[in-house]
Amino acid sequence: MLRLPSFDITFTQLILASVALHGILLIYGHWQDTHLVVKYTDIDYVVFSDASRYLTQGLSPYRRATYRYTPLLAQLLMPNIYLHESFGKWVFTGADLLIGVLIQKILRLRGMSEHRAVKFNAIWLLNPMVANISTRGNAESVIGAMVLGAFYLVMTRRIRWGAFLYGLSVHFKTYPIIYSIALLVMMDDKYFANELSQQDLEEKEEKQKVIQEQRRKENVVVRTVKDLVDFVTWRRVQFGLISGGWFFLITGLMYHFYGYEFLFETYLYHVTRKDHRHNFSFWFYNIYLTFTSPTGTLIGVLTFVPQLALVLAIGCCFGKDIFFCAFLQTFAFVAWNKVCTAQYFMWYIVFLPLLIPCLASNPRFSLKAQGGRMLLGWVASQGLWLSQAYNLEFLGLNTFWNLFLASACMFATNVWILVELIAGAEYEPIFGARGQIRRIWGASTASSRSV
């Protein structure tokens, strides 16, 4: 059993502490921007603000070079121009707090006590890395809030609203598309079992047992085809149509107003993107060496193959536990991505408070020992990379080969962590046989752990 820190605070107090942490960093950031040469504010935030300024002038946000986001983000941050330059940072802080609220609700739905949920939630709300990234002006927390909100709505069977929010999140940034297979896998027969009467449910279970027994006698090809046919249910089609419909509607509107430039900068650019600047990615050195070569673009596209294959496999295997699955998918996606910076870590850190209980509930996994080693390896591999990046960036030394070796070390560490997580976490499907949300982390809910 995991022993959590002994601090005793309410969720309201945790929120206030998080607001204070963000506020302190915002004040310090303003001081650093004013007095020091090295700025606290992220360059991306400057790009956002410039794009918003163009919108206030009735011009396209894409007049700002390197603005490669949906126009909706620039519209959201227009008060940066009208009210105050820090408005957007407070929006991102608000997104951090909203994520904290969603994490608390999800932990409580899965049976965790309020007191215990607050301690796990502190991993997000009091995380200095999260607060630093948001207060520097990075918008990743907005996407995280959309994704987690969509999961929560689907989990509570508000499919239409969940599909809308999911479609909106994919419009804002394409990476949440990786969760689509996991969401569909979660919507199995148990997801809608609560809509059936007890008699209908028993009859359906008996029918399924007969079908499963018959399919065991069939060859693999026939069985696979029938399973794929059964996978296509009306509810899954409905979710796909609604989420896809909202995505194409919003994207179509943006295309109507901003044309092909929007389509290329927001989506197509990232498919063929070749970033020759040093970053955490294992692929960066190869892209750097082939940057001007005709094969460079092909290599950049081919890097998607192992990345997407792994993400798809994880979604199919673990989709019934959507939060555990989403962490694994995002961690793998970032580790295999052809571009990787610190802000990408936010994509999976948002699921960390929902993953750690899965690790802590497995008696064969020592969170303190094994989890500590994984955290140490993750931090140490980044430290090794950063030391070589410092020699290149600030000392002007040619450390590209050393950087590649450090990236390879970090990639190997991430693969090891992924394997450890899959082996060590307690896989807990969201829904039980009767369609109820399984309260797996309650004090007296042992019966609810049965699937």
Image (spheres, rainbow, N blue to C red):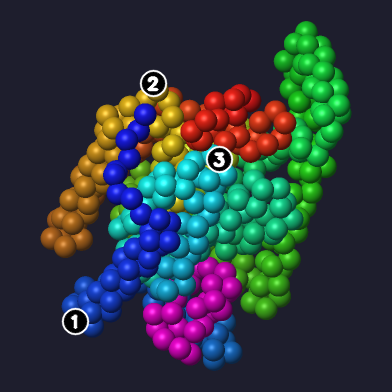
The residue drawn where x is 46% and y is 68% is 94
Q: Are marks 1 and 3 in contact (CB under 8 Å)?
A: no
Verify whether residue 66 appears in magenta: yes
Q: Is residue 407 left or right of residue 270?
A: left
Tell me the distance, in whole angstroms, between the alpha carbons under discs 2 and 1. Answer: 52 Å
The residue that appears at 48% across and 33% down in the rendered structure is 443
Q: Secondary structure at mark 1?
A: helix
**Label 2 amino acid?**
Arg
Amino acid bearing label 3: Arg
Residue 238: image location, x then y, percent: 79, 49
Mark 3, secondary structure of its residue:
loop
Nearer mark to the viewer, of 1 and 3: 3
Query: What mark, if any, has residue 35 been given in the picture?
Result: 1
Please report the bounds of the magenta region as a residue range: 61-88
Do callouts 3 and 2 mark residues in contact (Cβ within 8 Å)? Answer: no
Name the residue carrying label 2.
364
3 with respect to 206 (left or right): left
Residue 347: % across, % down: 45, 52
- Mark nearest the camera among 2 and 1 is 2
Q: Which residue is mark 3?
A: 110
Mark-to-mark CA distance, 3 and 2 = 21 Å
